[in-house]
Amino acid sequence: MSKSTRTTIETGRSSFVSWFTFVVGVPLGVGALYLVEHGPWQNELVQRYVEHEVEKAEVVLFFCALAMLLAKLLMALRERYVHTQQLLPSWDGKAIPVSEISKLQQSLALVWDSVSGSYLGRRIANILNFVSSRGSADELDDQMRTLSDNDANTLDSSYTLLRFINWSIPILGFLGTVLGITQATAGVTPEKLETGLNEVTGGLANAFDSTALALGFTMVSMFINFLVERYESSLLERVDSYVDAELSHRFVRSQVEGGGTGMIPPALQLLLEKQIAGMERAEQRWAQTHGPGQHEKWAAAMQQALDASLTRFGQRIAETEKKLLERHQAVLDGLASVVVALQETGREHQAAVARLTDAINLSVEMLAKLQSNEAHLLRLQDALNQNLGLLANSATFEQAVESLTAAIHLLSSRVNPSQAATLRAA
């Protein structure tokens, strides 16, 4: 199999996982949100944790992570199925010439369509291609180790997107908490604190729901990630064991075909013997120097180093927790001071309102008195009008009397002129 073909297979494997992650994960997340809000099993407690857009984004990302893990699990099960097939003909343990490698390639070609995307099929094809292209099995062990490392790196890099999702979910949770705190404290006024303090504190309590939801999703996703990654790693170990048992010693090496060490020059043979003897002496000295007690010392030293590392790690965690608590305490202290100031302002406003109420009550009493005085004035006005009427009637009566008196005088003057003259003289 050529290098371009291998690259195409790896790209196809990763592309399947990528498109399955979003094509399946996003609809699953949206469907879950719809069921929570409009489904037949609605729950207020569950709906509380998916109220805001940030929390909905966390749900969608969580289902994307689950979809990616499902895709990788399906690929792993397919890999496990490939291990049950017979990819190479049976072998009696005797080395075969490199010229017979075409039979192995033909046997693999019969099932290539079903194993082309698997680690095992790709590993066998690469090994056969290496031996066939070189015409020799020399350096096959190095090539097998290289292929094993490449597959391990490929497996590790396939979890890059999942690690990004697992990293972004708690970040979204913290972002939702910050936005919730900002929203809860943005419109706080003395009047609102006086009438709706429960709403402000309730908003601060709900602000941490997104963080709790994100941490829960991250724990579940990382646990399933651990299980799937461990399962895939075990499959890679099975691949290494299979190729080591079936291909590592299957071909005749050139040194054996040439007569073993008989083709080595005498000078080089002597040098090799001296080197081997020196290595044996060094091994003996090592065994004498580092006996069973030395292993116990090494184990004790490793245990001490591990304990020290765990202690430092615990101290770092404690320091980090302390810093976080200090930061949160500073925020809470600031909020407490704001609440105290608002309470004092509210009490001042209450006192001012009480004084204003007293003034209004006094004004109302004065208005009531004015109204009673106005009624009294109206009664006085009516009495005055009556008196004026009586006075007017009196004036008319006096005029009538004067007219009657004048008439009497006139009649008297006509009846008795002398008396009239007397009266006029008088």
Image (tube, rainbow, N blue to C red):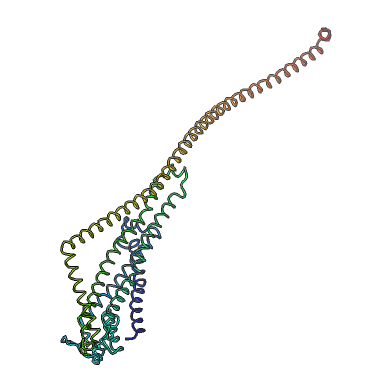
Q: Is residue 178 left or right of residue 287?
A: right
- Depicted 422 relative to depicted 384: above or below: above
Q: Quadrant of residue 125?
A: bottom left
Q: Is residue 147 left or right of residue 387?
A: left
- Depicted 54 relative to depicted 112: above or below: above
Say which quadrant the C terminus sits in: top right
- Depicted 204 relative to depicted 241: above or below: above
Numbered disc total: 0
In percent of width and height, residue 142 lies at 28, 80
In percent of width and height, residue 48 lies at 35, 56
Say which quadrant the N terminus sits in: bottom left
- Depicted 113 relative to depicted 315: above or below: below
Q: Is residue 187 left or right of residue 59?
A: right
Residue ID at (25%, 83%): 268
In percent of width and height, residue 285 lies at 18, 68
Residue ID at (19%, 68%): 286
Q: Is residue 273 left or right of residue 20?
A: left
- Which one is in front, 108 or 249? 249
Q: Quadrant of residue 284?
A: bottom left
In percent of width and height, residue 95 lies at 19, 87
- Which one is in front, 111 or 90? 90
Q: Quadrant of residue 317?
A: bottom left
